[in-house]
Amino acid sequence: MDKSYKVAIVGATGVVGRTAIKILEDKNLPISKYVFFSSKRSAGKIIEFKRRRIRGSRIKRRFI
């Protein structure tokens, strides 16, 4: 059975979030789905992950 992960990173545009994204890229884990959340100020910012450009989503209170 192949195992894959669903990953969400809160604060993806900040220093810690960018570091977490870099680690995930370096480890080359089998990620089937990923979502990057950012603050209202950084919402919509483009985040590069595994040669893809993903638009960061604004974190909303209902997700917390």
Image (tube, grey):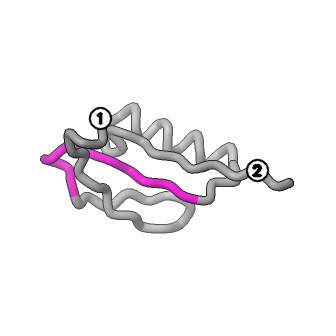
What secondary structure is found at the residue carrying circle 1?
loop
- Residue drawn where x is 57% and y is 50% of the image: 6
Residue to which mark 1 is pinned:
64
Does the segment drawn in magenta span residue 28?
A: no
Three-letter amino acid code at the position of disc 2:
Lys
- Magenta residues? 33-43
- Residue 50 rendering spot, x and y as whole percentages: 56, 61
Q: In the drawing, what numbered circle is on residue 53?
A: none
Q: Residue furthest bottom?
A: 52
Q: As drawn, is 8 to the left or to the right of 50?
A: left
Report the residue at 21% width, 54% height from top: 43
Q: Is residue 58 above or below residue 50?
A: above
Disc 2 element: loop
Residue 55 location, quadrant: bottom left
Inter-mark Cα distance, 1 to 2:
26 Å
How far from the left and from the top, in percent, is residue 2?
A: 81, 55
Mark 2: give few (<14), some (14-19) or many (20+) Cα within 10 Å: few
Q: Which residue is mark 2?
A: 3
Q: Earlier in the sequence, mark 1 or mark 2?
A: 2
In the image, residue 45 sits, relative to residue 12, either above or below, namely below
Q: Residue furthest front?
A: 62
Which amino acid is tagged 1? Ile
Query: Residue 56 falls in which quadrant of the image?
Result: bottom left
From what the image shows, is residue 4 above or below residue 52? above
